[in-house]
Amino acid sequence: MPQNAKKQPAKESRNIQHSIVRPRFFATEDRTELKTRLQQLANEIAAGLSSLETVESKELLGEFVTDLFLSVSEADRQKERRQRQAEGIAAARSRGVRFGRPRTALPENFYEVCAAWNNGEISLTGAAAACKMPESTFCDRAKKVTTAEK
């Protein structure tokens, strides 16, 4: 062995590639295709584990199975949580609960200023300034008031 060659630790040379353990599954796959991919993955893992000592391979396999069950249970928990959350939101909406930031009340002079703006007597900038509102908010509220009156 040459003097400048570095000796690698024995454990590093025995690691299984992580790309084998991290496949990407898509929801559009059918059951038979998923089963085939899982069988291929199992064969690749078994081939990688066969090169290790028995104790190490059992340890890695145990960790893999544990991670697999944890991932499945976490996915189920998240799915149930999303479903309960959606049911709660639907129930609240049916009771008339409004979500989001509450709207601020319109200023007292809004309707007069809005009518003047609609008639072209005042500019958008002047109307928004008279109501102490941003121009975009004034336009949005003016459109909703006009639509509600029709």
Image: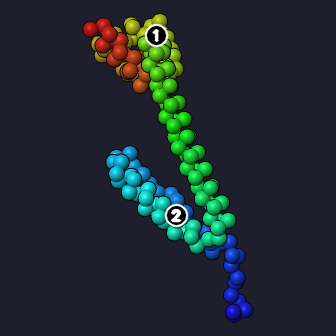
Residue 5: image x %, image y %? Answer: 68, 87
Residue 64: image x %, image y %? Answer: 58, 55
Number of marks in picture: 2
Residue 8: image x %, image y %? Answer: 68, 79
Q: Residue at x 50, y 31 (%)?
A: 80
Q: Nearer the viewer, mark 1 or mark 2?
A: 2
Q: In this view, which residue lies farthest toward the bottom?
A: 2
Residue type indicated by callout 1: Arg
Residue 49: image x %, image y %? Answer: 57, 67
For mark 2, give the secondary structure: helix
Residues packed near mark 2 inside 10 Å, few (<14), some (14 to 19) or many (20 plus): some
Residues packed near mark 1 inside 10 Å, few (<14), some (14 to 19) or many (20 plus): few
Contact (Cβ within 8 Å) of mark 1 with mark 2: no
Q: Nearer the viewer, residue 96 or 69?
A: 69
Q: Taking 88 as reference, is 127 left or right?
A: left
Q: Nearer the viewer, residue 120 or 99?
A: 99
Location of the N terminus by quadrant is: bottom right
For mark 1, give the secondary structure: loop
Q: Residue at x 66, y 65 (%)?
A: 56
Q: CA distance from mark 1 to mark 2?
A: 53 Å
Residue type indicated by callout 2: Ile
Location of the C terminus by quadrant is: top left
| Image mark for residue 95 | 1
What residue sits right under mark 2 in the picture?
45
**Residue 11, located in which quarter of the rendered image?**
bottom right
